[in-house]
Amino acid sequence: MSIPTYVPLILLFGFAAAVAGGLVVLDHLLGPKRPNPTKAGPYECGLVPIGTARDRLHVRFFLIALLFILFDVEAVFLYLWVYLFKDRQTRFLSLIEVFVFLSLLVAALVYAWRKGALEWE
């Protein structure tokens, strides 16, 4: 593949970046400017904020978020597998592959469960 085949793609990305940057600049130039300490503060469900917005979170929150992202991405792979399962020639092979994939998924879940990653105290 030569460089001229990528020119339309490069132009598309350049145009998209120019439009996005132009809109940000226009918003900054033409938007209303009414600074207010309440607007700059953290939003806490419409209530008066308790504490500061810079409080440290417990590491369990990050662990749960990481596990969620891990299993969510694996669910996306399962949706793709369902799409590929329609092909009759590779159906048995793909079925074996998905069982291996699901067994690894279950093993990861059991490991996280036994390590106490899903327990909240």
Image: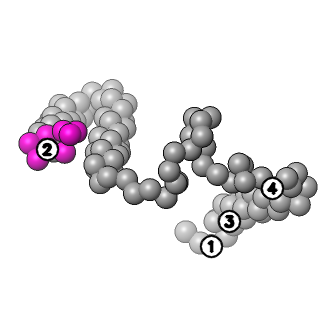
Q: CA distance from mark 2 to mark 4?
A: 46 Å
Depth check, mark 1 against mark 3: the one in front is: 3
Of all residues, the one furthest to the left in this rendering is 114
For image coordinates 69% across by 54% down, the residue present is: 40
Which numbered disc, 4 or 3, marks the residue that appears first in the sequence?
Answer: 3
Depth check, mark 4 against mark 3: the one in front is: 4
Q: Are marks 1 and 3 in contact (CB under 8 Å)?
A: no
Name the residue carrying label 2.
Answer: 116
Q: In the drawing, does residue 81 fall left or right of residue 99? A: right
In the image, what residue type sits under mark 2? Gly
Residue 89 % position (x, y) = 25, 32
Name the residue carrying label 4.
Answer: 35
Name the residue carrying label 1.
Answer: 3
Q: Are marks 2 and 1 in contact (CB under 8 Å)?
A: no
Which numbered disc, 2 or 3, marks the residue that appears first in the sequence?
Answer: 3
Residue 17 % position (x, y) = 72, 62
Instruction: Say which of 64 and 24 sits in front.
Output: 64
Name the residue carrying label 3.
Answer: 10
In the image, what residue type sits under mark 1? Ile
Which numbered disc, 1 or 3, marks the residue that appears first in the sequence?
Answer: 1
Which numbered disc, 2 or 1, marks the residue that appears first in the sequence?
Answer: 1
- Describe the element under mark 2 as helix, strand or loop: loop
Q: CA distance from mark 2 to mark 1?
A: 53 Å
Q: Is residue 87 magenta?
A: no
Q: Are marks 1 and 4 in contact (CB under 8 Å)?
A: no
The relative height of residue 92 versus residue 77 in the rendered view (above or below) is above
For image coordinates 59% across by 72% down, the residue present is: 2
Q: Which residues are magenta?
A: 113-121
Q: CA distance from mark 1 to mark 3?
A: 10 Å
Instruction: Say which of 5 and 74 sits in front.
Output: 74
The relative height of residue 81 versus residue 9 in the rendered view (above or below) is above
On the question of residue 89 being in view, the answer is: yes
